[in-house]
């Protein structure tokens, strides 16, 4: 007697349905916008952004206080993300009783 799992088949079926729906949606978008080829749409996207940035970047002014604030916020977010990852990793280790060493080993 062979044990077959039903879960992977359901997951596979759901993923196929999602991919099919996404493909149909993208195709409808491309046909509706008169862009029939994905390469052409990618070209239009890149060319549009390049033209937009060429027009807008010379008009942009940056304040020093805004730049310093952005750098400080990004640094704080990086530290908090690192700390959160550390806490989550420790909890997963305790929950799963995983025994992993904290030090890297040279091979």
Image (cartoon, helix red, strand yellow):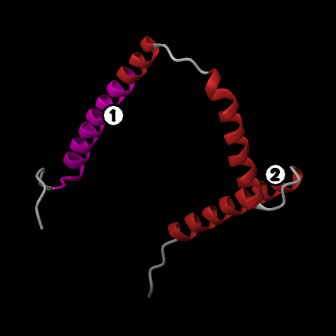
In-front residue for pair 37/77: 37
- The foreground one among 17 and 41 is 41
- Which residue is drawn at the image coordinates 86% and 49% (left, top)? 33
Q: Residue at x 33, y 34 (%)?
A: 81
Local packing at callout 1 (Cα closer than 10 Å; few below 14, some 14-19, many 20+) is: few
Q: Secondary structure at mark 2?
A: helix
Using the image, determine if residue 22 lies above or below residue 9. above
Q: Position of residue 14 (x, y in %)?
A: 62, 62
Q: Residue beneath label 1, please?
A: 81
Over which residues does the magenta segment extend? 73-98
Residue at point 24%, 39% (across, down)? 86
Q: Earlier in the sequence, mark 2 or mark 1?
A: 2
Percent from the top left, x then y, of residue 6?
A: 53, 70
Question: In the image, is residue 49 above or below residue 11?
Answer: above
Q: Which residue is mark 2?
A: 29
User: How far from the left and from the top, in percent, is residue 44?
Assistant: 75, 49
Based on the picture, tell me whether residue 106 belongs to the magenta stretch: no
What is the CA distance from the residue labelled 2 to the residue labelled 1? 37 Å
Q: Residues within 10 Å of mark 2 (few under 14, many from 20)?
A: few
Decide if residue 64 is on the left or right side of residue 59.
left
State whether residue 72 is above or below residue 93: above
Image position of 47 (left or right of 70): right
């Amino acid at each position: 007697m062979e044990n077959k799992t039903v879960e992977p088949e359901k997951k596979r079926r759901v993923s196929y349905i999602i991919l099919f729906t996404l493909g149909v949606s993208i195709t409808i978008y491309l046909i509706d916008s008169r862009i029939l080829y994905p390469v052409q749409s990618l070209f239009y996207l890149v060319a549009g952004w390049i033209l937009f940035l060429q027009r807008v970047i010379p008009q942009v002014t940056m304040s020093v206080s805004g730049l310093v604030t952005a750098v400080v916020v990004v640094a704080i977010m990086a530290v908090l993300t690192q700390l959160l990852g550390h806490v989550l990793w420790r909890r997963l280790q305790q929950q799963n009783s995983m025994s992993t060493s904290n030090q890297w080993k040279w091979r």
